[in-house]
Image (spheres, rainbow, N blue to C red):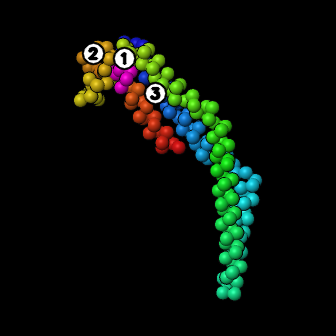
Amino acid sequence: MDDDGSSLAAPTIFILVALLQFIPRYLEHQIKSGGAPSDEEKELRAEIKQLLKEASTLSQPSTFAQAAKLRRTAAAKEKELTKCQEQQILDRKSLYNPYMKYVTPVKALTYLLLGVWFWKYPVASISKELVQPFGRMLSWKSGGGSEDKVMVGIVPWLILCSRVSKLICRKIM
């Protein structure tokens, strides 16, 4: 870390915090969305589509019972499709669960290590004009500041980075 504030600590910490926010979101996205639909799922969708198409062609009063039977069959196939999708989600959860249980402890340990490492040192320096009313809050536990710059401490920087990276992850996924 340089005295003039040209350190790479701030962007490095931001990238690390963003990765720690992105990884659990990515794993949750993988659990929910999964991959390509299975052959059974494709077959069920095609059968449902075909049954509903046949039922829509039977619009005469004399064929009402047959159309109703086809719609009930399609509804039963849709329930079967829902069960198949739920089973796939459970399978994916069991695949990613070993990784998900380590995400929070790794995140907490990383924040703790960053806090200990940068406790007395500023992470970045920003012009006083840019952070006029919030200068003291940003320089919390980061050492002294100069006349025209505010030194940003690790705690406010971690809070800021986690908020911004959560927002970015929400917009991406």
Q: Which residue is mark 1?
A: 122
Identify the residue at image location x=63%, y=36%. 96
Q: Residues within 10 Å of mark 2 (few under 14, many from 20)?
A: few
Q: Which residue is mark 3?
A: 14
Nearest to N terminus: mark 3 or mark 1: 3
The image position of residue 123, as x and y in percent, is 39, 19
Distance Cα–Cα, label 1 vs label 2: 12 Å
Q: Look at the picture and state if 142 lies above or below 16.
A: above
- Name the residue type under label 1: Pro
The image position of residue 82, as x and y in percent, is 65, 56
Q: Quadrant of residue 52?
A: bottom right
| Secondary structure state at the residue bearing disc 2 | loop
The boundaries of the magenta stretch are 151-156
Q: Which residue is mark 2?
A: 146
| Magenta-colored stretch includes residue 145 | no
Q: Are marks 3 and 2 in contact (CB under 8 Å)?
A: no
